[in-house]
Amino acid sequence: MVKKRWVGNSVMILLLALFFFREIIVDTFFPLGTWTRTSSSTDHSLLIQRSAALPVAPVPLRQAFAGRTLNVSDRVLELAPPGIRTEFEENRNVDGYGLTVVRNACFLPGGEIVLVNITDEYLNQTLSASPKLQELWSAGYNSTCGWCQKTGSQLSPEAPEGARWIPGNTTHILPYLGNVFHNFAERIWPHLASHHPPLNQTAMQPINHFLIHKFTTWIEQADAGNHERENFMLQFRVLAELSPGSDFVVMDSTGQNHPVCFERITLSCSSCDRMSTTLGHQVFSASITSYREAAFKFFGVPEPAVSAPPRPLRVAFYGRSDTRRRRVANAGEVMEHLRAWDSPPLDILFLDELLSDKRYNQTMPETVALFSHTDVLVTVHGANTWATMFMPRRAAVIEIYGPCGPGTWIDNVARALDLKHDTTSNPWRDKVASPLAGNTTQCEGAIQTPDFTLDTIKLDEAIAKLALPTGPLDRIPLHWLYDWKKRAYATHLVEG
């Protein structure tokens, strides 16, 4: 018995030693952001809480693109060479990921693509040779879908009259409207992966120009207060940071009437896999890391780290109150419950409340700042999970599916950032019919699906599981080893 007790004590001592040694290393090389000290009415005489204002300056959208646009009317004078012919380049990766390059394709000012000096037979033969290419073409350039973003297409025996010529490598992107997660996952992600093997063997590099469909329209809508448009445009702007010297071709500005032909242009991925790992974890992790670092640098956000005592865990809770379905019906009750936690204490942000009060508008600078200052995210599955890529490494996500279990998209992010990602707890309690989503308590698909309540006891259990360490760099368990009243580590855990 004595030997077993000695072994148990030795293990605990070793664990604490690892934590303390780790803290010296992490605090030295990964310093925390600035926090403000405030008094508290709880048993703790001192708490350290998040600043009320998000620690990031807003980035005006037009200012973000200043100096990085290529206005065709003003700056592109060279005419398209006579006798050009459109050609689809061979791409052995197309079925796995798309990113097909087309030579000598032209675009009209309204965005329609013009294929020059080819026949219907050549086009059909080229598209039918690859199911993926056929899918991409149908989704983005020849779609009959009434609500889809599409350009339309036509064949022409020669380049449009007066067409200007842009040499080099251009990437065409059709934004995904209405959902910033899908925009990142299906429009940004493919081009992140293209910087790494094996896609870089066939993807067009370097990228000299980006052609965003209806560029000026989205800028104007963002100016009018559309934060979703602002968000996805800034996603594209950060993407350009990975291609130094690149610019954005502007074709749809006022008075613009020049068609443009491109030496080489990558077709938009309008139906690419959502942050697929078919290429392997090595590619995915490198891709996410490159974009994450570019965003931190662009918005002036330091590399984040998980809080360690005496700073409490920074927890963000999102119950989807601003949406139509999969909402937490008792979100207010859950928030009050979380705010009452004291072992360990939690510094809580209620995203639903911030969204309702317009203190958080989900602009990209706000999103990067907020998630980089979040140690634990408690969220219902949804589009906001795309921003977990900006959380500190080894942070935690409790992702709640509810009764209908839609699945997750962020396993890949969790692995890349060593996040503690819990999808098994799923602490829902009761189904609640949503009048905005079919008014049903049945799981009838992604659109008609119920709201639900959370079980606070099960949620407590999910949070408590975060106390289990996953490795010597896991800071989160320190909050359970710390005596918050004495403001010292709980040495009584080690028996003498």
Image: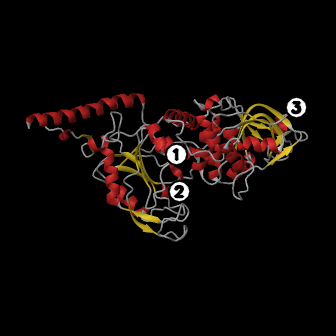
Quadrant where the N terminus is found in the figure: top left
Query: Mark 2–mark 3 contact, CB under 8 Å?
Result: no
The amino acid type, in three-letter code, at marker 3 is: Pro
Viewer-side label of 1, 3: 3
Q: Which mark is residue 53?
A: none
| Residue 17 visible in the shown view | yes
- Helix, strand, or loop for circle 1? helix
* 2 or 3: tag closer to the N-terminus: 3
**Left or right of residue 94, residue 17 in this image:** left
Instruction: Residue at 52%, 45% (x, y): give it.
Output: 387
Q: How many marks?
A: 3
Q: Which mark is residue 387?
A: 1
Up-down relation of residue 355 to residue 480 (above or below): below
| Dot 3 alpha-carbon crowd within 10 angstroms: few under 14, some 14 to 19, many 20 or more | few
* 1 or 3: tag closer to the N-terminus: 3
Instruction: Residue at 54%, 65% (x, y): give it.
Output: 448
Quadrant where the C terminus is found in the figure: top left
To which residue does mark 2 refer? 355
| Dot 2 alpha-carbon crowd within 10 angstroms: few under 14, some 14 to 19, many 20 or more | some
The amino acid type, in three-letter code, at marker 1 is: Ala
- Colour scheme: secondary structure
Instruction: Residue at 32%, 55% (x, y): give it.
Output: 460
- Helix, strand, or loop for circle 2? helix
Residue at mark 2 to residue at mark 1: CA–CA distance: 16 Å
Residue 320: x and y, percent?
A: 50, 59
Residue 410: x and y, percent?
A: 48, 45
* 2 or 1: tag closer to the N-terminus: 2
The amino acid type, in three-letter code, at marker 2 is: Leu
To which residue does mark 3 refer? 81
Residue at mark 2 to residue at mark 3: CA–CA distance: 52 Å
